[in-house]
Structure formats: C-alpha cells, structure tokens
Amino acid sequence: MCGIVGYIGSKDCSEVLVSALRKLEYRGYDSAGIAVFEDGKISVKKAQGRLDDLEKKMEYEGRPLGHAGIGHTRWATHGVPSETNSHPHRGGEKVTLVHNGIIENYKELKEMLIESGREFVSETDTEVAAQLLDSNYDGDPVKAIAKTLSQVEGSFALGILFSDRAGEIYAVRRESPLIVGVAEGESFIASDVPAIIKYTKNYYLLEHDEIAKLTEEGVTFCDLQGNPIEKELKVADWNEDAAEKGGYDHFMIKEIHEQPTAVKTTITPRIVEGMPNLEECNITIDALKDINQIYIVACGTAMHAGMVGKYVIEKLAKVPVIVDIASEFRYREPLIHKGDLVIIISQSGETADSLAAMRLAKSMGAQTLGIVNAKGSSIAREADMLIYTHAGPEIAVASTKAYMVQIAVMYLLSFELAFAKGFITDGECCRLTDTLQGIPALIEDTIDKTNDLCHDIAEKLTEAESLLYIGRGLDYALSMEGSLKLKEISYIHSEAYAAGELKHGTISLITEGMPVIAVATQNSLYDKTVSNIKEVRARGAMVVLVCDEKAKVGADVADYIIRVPQTDEVLMPMTAAVPLQLLAYYTSVLRGNDVDKPRNLAKSVTVE
Ligand code: F6R
C-alpha cells in the first residue's frame, strides 16, 4: 500500500519527509520520491527501490532544500515499479501530487486528456489525476480539486502542490486514509499516525471529500464548495512502537482490521466494466478456455486458501482441481500433463517447498500461475503467470489478511474461468463480481459485530485441552484455516473435520465440555451440519456455531452463536473467516502468549 507524507514548517523539509516515510515502510513499497519547493520552484527526486536508494540519489544529485513539500512510497498497482511510475507526479506546469488508492475510471479520463492534447510519461492512474487537476486549475485550488473529484471514481488520498502557491500544501481524500498533523509553526499530512508521531501527537482525521490547506501558520479545512469546516483535534496516546501497530496491541489484530482495504486494493484493478479482468497478469479468456485440469499447490494457510479455490472453481467452472501440500506434491510423483495449470499460492513467495513444487511442475510442462504477496520474490519471478495480492506486508506470523486476499483472487479467477468455459453468462459473472466488490464493507461489519462476542467466547476456550472445528463443503475448507489459526498461536490442540466424517471414528474424542466450533454458512448443507452438531452436543460438546445472520437456528443447537453478515453462499468464507481469526487471536491473548511471534514458527519458511 502506498504511503503519503507532507510537511510545511521551519525544518529541513527533505529530511522530515524521508524520516516520516521510513515510518510508513511497514506498508510495503517498491519506489519512493519527494517534491519540495526550492527557491519557489518545485524540485522532484524519485528512485526505484528503497528509501536508502532515494537518499543515495539525493546525495549524488543534491537534496532539495526547502520548507514545504510532499513525499510518497509506492506499492505498484498500475504500471511496473520504476522511477517514471513513482510519485510525485507532475500534471503539467501547475500541479505536482502524490496519491494513495486507485482511480477506477483512469482509462476513460486518460483518453479524454490525450484527445485534448496532453501527453503522458507514466503508466499510472496517478498521473491521470495529476493531469486532470492541472487542466482544471485556474488559480483557485479548492475549485480545481472539487471539479477533479466530480470527475474521478475510486478510493484515493492526495497530497498536492500548486506551482504558484509556494507556501501551501493541499490534501483531500475519498476512502483512503489521510491525517493532518499540527504542531507549533508546522503541519503535516500522512497516511498513518506513525509517520508524524516523532514530531507531534496532535492530528485531525480528514473525512471523505474534505479539503485541508496547510501553511506555516496552521491548517484550515473546507468542503468541496469551499465552506469552512471545524474539526476535532485528536491526540495520539501512543509511543513510536505502538504507533507502528496503528494503536493496536498486536500486528495480528491490526492486520485483521486491514482486511477490507487489502481486499479492495487487490480486486479493484482486476475488475473492468464489471467483469474480472486478469489480462495484466497474462491471463486471458482464450487461455482459460483451454484449461482442463488445475493443481493448487501451497503450504499452511495458503494451502487452505487453495481449498476454498477448489470448491469454488469446481462448483462454478466445472474444472477438476487437486489441492496439494507442496512438501507432498514435490515427492509424490504427481501426474502432471503438458498444459495443466499449476497454481502456487504464497504470501512470502519464498517458501522452499512451494518454490520447489513450482519448479517441478514447470519441468513437467505445466503452466504455472503464482499468487504471491511479496513483490519480486522467487515465486513471483519464476512463475509463468503472476497475480500479486495487495495485502501490504504481513508482520504477524499468523496469516490473516494474506489469506483473505488469496481467497479474493481465487474468486476472481473462478468467476473468469466459469465465464470462459461458458458455465455462467456475462450477466451472472457481473453479478458475482459485484457481490465480491461489496465484501470489504461486509468484512468491516463482521469485525464490528463479532469482535466482543469472540473475546467472550475465547475466555471459555483458554482452558480447553483440545478443540474440533467442523463444517461441510466450503465450511470445511474454512474450518481447516480456523483450526490452524487457533493452534499456532494459542498452543491448544485442534483439528478440523468434515462434519459428516465425525462418526467414522473421531466422535469418540468428544467428552463433556469439549469445545466444537461448527461452521454452517452454506444454506444447502445447513440441515446436514446441524444434524452433526446435534451428534456432538448429545455427547457433551460445547458448541460454538458460526452461521449467517439470517439462519434459523433451533434453541438446542449451540451454546454460542456467532452470526456473520449474509452474502452469496459461495462468498461466505470471506465473512465467516473473521470470527475464526478473532477467536484464535483472543484465545492467544488471554493465555498470555506472544501473539505475533508464536514459538517455533518463522514468517517465511525458506528451508525444507
Ligand atoms: C499460518 C501461516 C503459514 C503460511 C505457510 C506458507 O498462519 O502463515 O501456514 O501460510 O508457511 O507461507 P507462504 O504463504 O509465505 O508460502
């Protein structure tokens, strides 16, 4: 995710901008840049790579000396990581800006601007915003910003310099976050509080479509019509360490809260005119038509994302899918045929077994598709086709947001494959894609609605010796992930079971009070799962049921019911995953464990 900063005051602006950007490094980036008013003119410095690369460049070329400017770290979405695509972008003579978010209608706007004679140097949606604003500016910043916002669609935060206003910075946002920090004689903008906490704890939260004007004298706010707005000053009560966690106690819970943004950032660039479009990843409808067998190979949580993918692809696109644990796949002499598609899912892109499995599949003539979060990682570099997930860096060892974006990509792929194979119409494909686009809001809703209940239920789980997670179909796939999450951070043994399989042995484990987490979000399987729940409850199990908010649950079915927002049955894992993550998180916290760094585990497993 990109990071934005801005500074105006008496300090050396370049130094403040780079130091503030360092505090946003956790968001992940592949290039960086700053723009500073130097002797009344805007000087821009950018570099591909890390902030150290930008600093080296400035040592060599000279650092802009001034007291007002903006800075940016870029996590590429539109266009490759390169100096040209990095921010700040000039929109012509009048405007220079930095941007976080996505301008969804940038293609149409770009065509319109080209027709009016403008030329573009980068592949980014940001340059479109810069050029549009430049074309709208005739000396009145608020009017120009308002007009530009009436033309752009998407979610974005912008930090803006106008060439003829050397002592001013402007900022505006829609959906993407932006804060405005204030201190004596200086003010700041930033994507997140950690960037400014070294300089000030006082800040304002910029709301949708509010414009901030920063000068050395202070900050003023107005709406798009120019009407002044009074805002409440907030005071961050965090130290620098807490600030990096965004005020949360642990990275894991912060990352759970980042899921709506991560999903939105991952899917939005891959939806064109309502349909999934993976052409930028070298996946075309024609190529998908020829796929007759898919393998999904991965480890741990990533493999569980593959399990969700299997159910959805087979249900919608009718292509057989085999999900394999990478460490098994590479030694079991898999029957890969030329033209089979082998999908490797990996957050880190460096997991040794997944990488080796991919190389094996390639050597056997398969087409390989990497679904990877870490840019430039080995799997990303070596896969024939690549879909980056845009979760930003995941710091907690237990994966949450990376899983969520992996399944989001599985959905996009399944919808496109089902359409390519002729099993759904374009109308149905659009409907599913549209429902997927509504998921980020539902995830947010689920976190709000289930957080406290999950905390209370976790109190009942802390003393358990062992748990079972049960479900059918997609709920079983999700149960596997819920079970792994709990065991890896709470250190309580747990196992996921297909609900219908219990009576073939495992049900003998049920004793009085044993917790069973039952996931039953699939309407078509609901009654069957309830029968299995009754079987365990009759033997003394304490049942926690995760179901959709509209499910009619009989009085004797569960001890606790966690209801999640309803959506299309096929997409239910995206909301139902949230309480499973929260249950694991709070159980670990209540047991006093090191939640973000569980014992014996590493974030990236680069050994066999
Ligand atoms: C569990 C977890 C692991 C990883 C697995 C694969 O929370 O994070 O199970 O999913 O080690 O890692 P990647 O996705 O980096 O290949």
Image: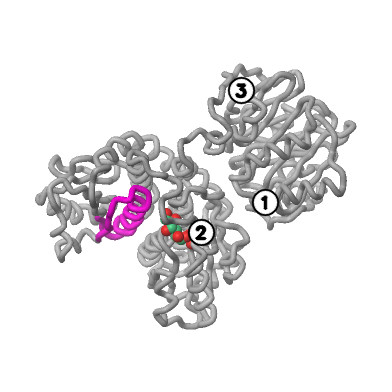
Q: Is residue 604 left or right of residue 303?
A: right
Q: Nearer the viewer, residue 117 or 37?
A: 37
Residue in view at x 72 percent, y 27 percent: 142
How far across and how far down the image is residue 154, in percent? 59, 42
Residue in view at x 61 percent, y 49 percent: 28
Binning the other alpha carbons within 10 Å of mark 2 as few (below 14), some (14 to 19) or many (20 upward) gives some
- The disc labelled 3 sits on which kind of residue? Asn
Which quarter of the picture shows residue 454?
top left
Q: Which mark is residue 107?
A: 1
Q: Which mark is residue 202?
A: 3
Give the mark, 2 or 3, whose residue is nearer the N terminus.
3
Q: Secondary structure at mark 2?
A: loop
Residue 34, relative to residue 306: is it above or below?
Answer: above
Q: Secondary structure at mark 1?
A: helix
Task: For the residues labelled 1 and 3, say whether their Cβ atoms are less than 8 Å apart.
Answer: no
How far across and how far down the image is residue 366, in percent? 51, 78
**Magenta-drawn stretch, dominant element (helix, strand or loop):** helix
Range covered by the magenta-colored residues:
470-497
Alpha carbon separation for disc pair 2 and 3? 37 Å
Q: Is residue 365 left or right of residue 217?
A: left
Alpha carbon separation for disc pair 2 and 1? 37 Å
The answer as to whether callout 2 falls within 8 Å of ligand 1 is: yes
- The disc labelled 1 sits on which kind of residue? Lys
Give the mark, 1 or 3, whose residue is nearer the N terminus.
1
Magenta highlight on residue 490: yes
Q: Is residue 434 visible?
A: no
Binning the other alpha carbons within 10 Å of mark 1 as few (below 14), some (14 to 19) or many (20 upward) gives few
Q: Which residue is mark 2?
A: 604
- The disc labelled 2 sits on which kind of residue? Ser
Alpha carbon separation for disc pair 1 and 3? 39 Å
